[in-house]
Image: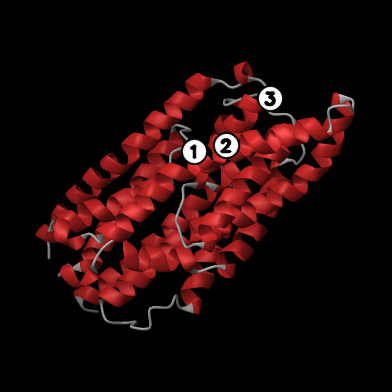
Amino acid sequence: MNTSYLIIVLTVILALSFDFINGFHDTANAIATAVSTKALTPRRAIMIASIMNFVGAVAFTGVAKTIAKDIVNLDAIPNGAVVILAALISAIVWNLVTWYFGIPSSSSHALIGSIAGAAITAAGTASINFKGFISIIESLILSPILAFGVGYVVFTIIKQIFKNLNLSKTNRRFRRLQALTAAIQAFAHGTNDAQKSMGIITMALVSNGLDKSGNIPLWVQVCCATAMALGTSIGGWRIIKTVGTQIMKIKPVNGVAADLSSALVIFGASKFGLPVSTTHVISSSIMGVGSAYRVKAVKWNTGKRMVITWFITLPIAASISAGIYAIINLFL
């Protein structure tokens, strides 16, 4: 097996590993509210999330096409496969570090920052598709702001509709509803997050002349969806604990509002082929719901810690991938 094919095989393995890790790292966010309110047991929530993530992952390909075409100009990079390999290693390292410490960081920021860092190291800024890259960055920045606003509005509407009902009775009703909203949330997660690895594998195939159709191959869709579903089945209690308990004390009515709000934003982004950070969107929607419920109910210090992590992920991931690319390139 020559070097280029070996790199392709390694890239596919690492992309599937990234999806697997993404499954237990990011999918924990999708079921955090349902588990924290005891609407679902962790085991049942993870089972539902695994199935719905798989379905969501094979239902859409718009985000995958954006990742494959809109971040870098593959024609401007002489060794695109090495760039992709370095980016994947970098994103996986960052995901594992943040998972270990229970920090709800963003796999999307890590991956996109890693791709940009390795590409610039390989071929300078000419390798970046600035129009597409800026559009993606705008999506990553604006989506959590939008999620906060939608969460605030949705909970305000729910509060007005049920204002005359007994709170404990309302929460019992919403606890039953949370199983459904958690499933919707997990489906939405699959429509966006699993797509990123599909786009990465397609980039690798295109850069080596193994695919020229511009479409996402079916085998890539199925493999990535399966990897994420398997990762989800392992679960991610560290992240569930942070998102489900340390942002605010979530009641079933809060959880339903947060799930619906974040799913709406993620679906909208997937429809337009825009990658977003599901971690950012879900956490921000919880903060929006908490603000509408009672501003003091939100633990803003946790939110501040997450925002700092969100901002540093892109440059750190880019730096790590640049270093990894330089090391790999020494041996080729």
Q: Is residue 220 visible?
A: yes
Secondary element at tag 2? helix
Residue positioned most to the left: 330
Circle on res. 145: 1
Q: Residues within 10 Å of mark 2 (few under 14, many from 20)?
A: some
Dots 3 and 2: beta carbons under 8 Å?
Answer: no
* Quarter of the figure with residue 106: top left
Query: Which of marks 1 and 3 precedes in the sequence?
Result: 1
Q: Are marks 1 and 2 in contact (CB under 8 Å)?
A: yes
Q: Position of residue 78 (x, y in %)?
A: 14, 70
Q: CA distance from mark 3 to mark 1?
A: 18 Å
Find disc 2 in the rendering and name its residue: 149
Q: In this image, 158 relative to 231: left or right?
A: right
Horizontally, residue 157 falls left or right of residue 196, namely: right
Residue ID for mark 3:
293
Image quarter where the N terminus lies is: bottom left
| C-alpha separation, residue under disc 1 versus residue under disc 2 | 6 Å
- Amino acid type, mark 1: Ile
